[in-house]
Amino acid sequence: MEWSDVRIFLAVMRSGTLGGAARALRLSHPTIGRRLRALEEATGHTLFQRTADGHVLTEEGSAIVALAEQMEEGALALERRLAGQEQDLRGCLRISSADWFGAYVLPPIIADYSKAYPGVDVEILTGTRLFSLAQRESDIAFRIVPFDTSDIVQRRLARLNYGVYVAATAPEPVFGDGMGFRLITHDTSTGHFPDIAWLMESFPNATPVMRSNNRNVQARMCRQGVGIAVLPQAVGKQTPGLRLLDLPSEPPSRDIWMGYHRDLKHLQRLRAFITVVEDHLREVLP
């Protein structure tokens, strides 16, 4: 049984569809279907039930999931270990972060890095999903929460300061009141956001009017006069048309954490990138 076929089996199991597996593995839909059929013929078992809603594991398919994941863990460990031994500054470097970090903090870092190391192809992955470092979905990640597994080398890079913003031409809201104003908040279903809780407590009589899980959207809505927003200052300072409020207290700050898998600690293109990051963040996020 080939690892490439087992990899397809796991992708179909996780996505539930051939199309989802094709997107995850960057293969064509027909290739996924052909390889899956070949795997079922090789094992002599039907591993998935084809339904109108997608592919559902059969009893035989469910029985081999744990073994397939063990094979995956070994293959990924081998891939990471070999990648970590690469000494040249070529290849691909995958970076994951929140949307605002990718839009407002990373661009000058990537510009300097790409200028210094033109042989490295950089891929930026942003969003609310935490990309897996163990599965090489990302080589290095930036988060506002610490990493929770022992195989990740991590460090706290800087303190992230937040500010409260309104449109440049908007009147000044009264701290501790907020009557007559509206609030732009965050989707808290993905976790706790101390800055959003602080905003609502600091302007208790303001009306929450909209929420978004994207800081870029929050900033642009604020600029249009939709309401008061609390934003990372790295976002607020770079968004024209916003005014930072001078308040008697400030929103709680957060830490920026950087992490990568320990098997990649000797990867030269990663080590070079970390050096560029540290130089930049000392200036951008003091």
Image: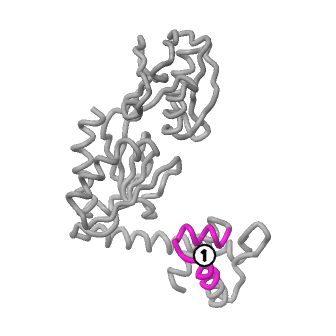
Residue 35 forms part of the magenta stretch: yes
Q: Position of residue 148 (x, y in %)?
A: 44, 47
- Inspect the image, locate mark 1, and give the three-letter code of the amino acid beneath it: Phe
Query: Which sits in the foreground, 41 or 189?
Result: 189
Main SS of the magenta part reads helix
Classify 123 as above or below 145: below
**The magenta stretch spans which residues?**
17-36
Q: Position of residue 241 (x, y in %)?
A: 44, 28
Classify 242 as above or below 142: above
256 with respect to 217 (left or right): left
Query: Which sits in the foreground, 75 or 209?
Result: 209
Q: Position of residue 81 (x, y in %)?
A: 33, 69
Q: Residue placed farthest to the front in the image?
A: 169
Query: Which sits in the foreground, 133 or 216?
Result: 216
Q: Residue placed farthest to the right in the image?
A: 52
Q: Position of residue 194 (x, y in %)?
A: 50, 28
Residue tagged by mark 1? 9
Colour scheme of the rendered structure = one colour
